[in-house]
Image (cartoon, coloured by chain):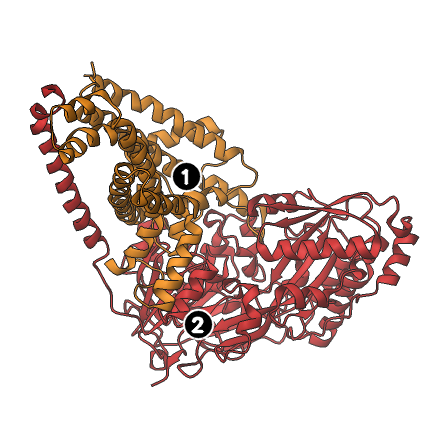
Amino acid sequence: MYFLKRALFLIPLLLVITFMAFALVRLAPGGPFDNERKPASPEIERNLKAKYHLDEPVWKQYLRYLGDLSHGDLGPSLKYRNHTVNDIIRQGLPVSLTLGLLAFLIAQGIGIPLGFITAVGRGRWPDYAGSFFAILAICIPGFVVGPLLIMFFSIRWQIFPPAQWETPWHAILPSFALGLFFAGRISRLMREGMTQALQEGFIVTARAKGMSETRVLVRHAFRIAVLPVVSYSGPLLADLLTGSFVVENIFNIPGIGVFMVNSSLNRDYTMVVGLVLLYATLLLVMNLLVDISYGLLDARVKYE
Amino acid sequence: MDALGNDRTPTRSNLMRFCLLSTIFLLAVSLLGCGKKEPRADIVIINGAEPQSLDPAIITGQPDGRAAGALFEGLTRLNPKTATAEPAIAERWDVSTNGKLYTFHLRKNAKWSTGAPITSEDFIYSWRRVVDPLTASEYAGQLFFVQNAEAISMGKIKDLSQLGVRAIDTHTLRVELNAPCPFFLDLCAFRTLSIVPRAAIEKHGDRWLLTPPVPTSGPYALESWRIRDKIRIRKNPYYWDAANVQNEIIDLLPIDQQTTALSLYTTGQVDIIWDKGLVPNELLDVLRNRPDMHTFDYLGTEFIRYNVTKKPFDDPRVRKALALAIDKQRLVDKITKGGEKTASSYTPPGTAHYLPPAGLGHDPSLAKKLLAEAGFPNGKGFPNFIYLTSNTKTSVQLAVEIQEMWQRELGIHCEIAQKEWKVYLTDQSELNYDVSRSGWVGDYNDPNTFLDMFMSNNGNNRTGWKNPRYDQLMRDANQITDLNRRAELLRDAETLLVHDDLPIIPLFFRTGVNFFDPAKFEGIYFNLLDEHPLWPIRRKR
């Protein structure tokens, strides 16, 4: 019941978000059809605007947009004039989803064990080595990691292709370039959570009861320690699934991440609103899922 | 204790199962997602930014034009070596003595990629579509030399059939011009005037290029177009000159990142890069001596616009002083590094039917004198002003260098306003600047493509400069058939632009850069229009 209510509440929230995006992008100076060369006559410019209804008042444009949206049509792209926003999302989203999920798996796959190990071995060399790696991953941004990976793995050792999106081989470098930073973040969160969990009363009780150390760590401490990682993972997944501007650019990956930035630079109004809507939906749904998984992981959390 | 551990085992095993299933699902998706590998194309080319469109009537950018030019053709096409017009769908033509009436004879064997014959009706439809205001073709101006085209485009004539192009029979086309136009045959090779398939467009609307099969009129057919991924084209077996098309499949990759382009090229994943913008200037010194780097001149000018409606730039002496203070040689040696030639005229040397006039050079002492005459000795009293530029790296580097030159030579100071592209364009159009970085690339090989934009009411003028004498000279020049007399009039006009009145400062002429290994590929030539048709390119055996 609680989740149904929350799910219903998403609809007005999304409407508000689309309206904000719709209005704000139109406030930016310049329009989708301002190019280095002016069209041959002002009439052409006028017709261009009329064709996409940009000559109407904003409220009317918005109502028209909602009408189209109600049967799933996000409108034509104003920049890529042979494509609709649906075309572009249909082509790019699966790619971004794949890349995002791979990066997510890498982030969790490296981050959680690393955080676990550094917390358990606190103050000894596994902690120092692991924490050094984690901090390094956090400090080096994607636009440095990407080219470095290309330089070594593609150009020098010729193991992986440097760019494009064709075979599974092509996915490896970009997934790491995207995932490493988050692996570092998750490892820090995990280490923090684990350290705290190990000081909890029930751990002391479990140890006092004579439970084996592995069982204490894995069964009891881990489940509480992983909670901060879970709440971080929801928005992270939404973020990763909608693509990354930097990584998609460096590796020339045909996802939607690049459009997130370029569409606003191009003043591609319909594209901006379509992508904001997509991102907001994913983000809200992921947060809802995080809340659900809290109930499953932590016995102290109950939803009415 | 129980509440914290053992009794929750079912939930945990559900969780485990969920994790396991989703991992398998993810792996399956990722393998599926990247599993489809196509055979490698004969030639893979990095083509620059993702095209806005491949519709000849809609496109404006160069990468768009290169892709669309492989798919659609017009009456003439550009010779790959010289970039001058040669017969294409029209096999020959007659021109009336007054230069205003062209009769084109179409090839009987010209066909669409679907096998259907190409007739004069295809040209009539395609050209009317360009000037139809409803198409909103930004390059419709390329047809304004044809009778009534401008009036139709302006909405003054509603009847499209008034356009000065008529079918004599299925394979003969008559075109009536407003005035003699020495470059009309070159224009006929321009993308905007290519023919497009009526039935497909009327059936599918704006998405006609995404709905296969797309009937094409040029050397290639469109095999697939995935946005920001690749455009794959395949030889059109029905093309009238298919026998001379030297390759079967070409991939055009939409890449605008310099490092990505270079790493793909270095690792042999792509064969050709053709855009100077795709190579970092910093590397040009290192790359210059490699046999696979090719530089050449083309019709492009880098210049500075003045807003002549603002004080003190309304005074030609001030405009000249700032121009004379710039050491253009230093700009090309230190920043652009592509072997660019400095510019004193606006029209590049080599432009057909023309010899550009000499403009101003580099003379700091004369610059100081002129500035003093204008009332600002040693820059005293000169207001701080705005140098508007886009935020691309090279433009900003040029701005900083020029700012320093003005400060040093003239004692005047400008603020550099780096604006995001659309804001920069808007500010320039609305004359919301003092001086501004600008560039222009010729559409066809004639001085008109450079000079007509500075007529008083041209939307590309953007300086506020209005000179009735300039307008008159341009109009007169474009009314006469005598090419020498025309060149004189155009030169007089350009003299006003770059010597007497100076609403702009020409800086340098652009250089094109192509990367390909000449031991492996042939059939790519360098010409003033930076045009490299795809059909003659061949991988050497």
Left or right: residue A294 compared with residue A85: left
Badge 2 marks a residue whose secondary structure is strand
- Dividing the picture into quadrants, the one containing residue B474 is bottom right
Q: Residues within 10 Å of mark 2 (few under 14, many from 20)?
A: some
Residue B15 on image: x %, y %: 13, 33
- In front here: A65 or B237? A65
Left or right: residue B103 compared with residue A83: right
Residue B355 on image: x %, y %: 72, 74
Whole-number angstrom distance, CA of label 1 to CA of label 2: 44 Å
* Residue at which label 2 appears: B172
Residue B317 on image: x %, y %: 86, 55
- Dividing the picture into quadrants, the one containing residue B467 is bottom right
Left or right: residue A199 compared with residue A162: left
B277, above or below B379, in the image: below
> CB atoms at circles 1 and 2 under 8 Å apart?
no
Residue A7 on image: x %, y %: 25, 23
A269, above or below B82, in the image: above
A8, above or below B353, in the image: above
Q: Chain of mark 2?
A: B
User: In the figure, what tint was chain B given?
Assistant: red
Residue at the image position 19 percent from the left and 21 percent from the top: A202
* Residue at which label 1 appears: A270
- In front here: B34 or A66? B34
Residue extending furthest toward the top = A304
Q: Which chain is orange?
A: A
Q: Residues within 10 Å of mark 1 (few under 14, many from 20)?
A: many
- In front here: B315 or B59? B315
Q: Is residue A148 visible?
A: yes
Q: Amino acid at mark 1?
A: Thr
Residue extending furthest toward the bottom = B541
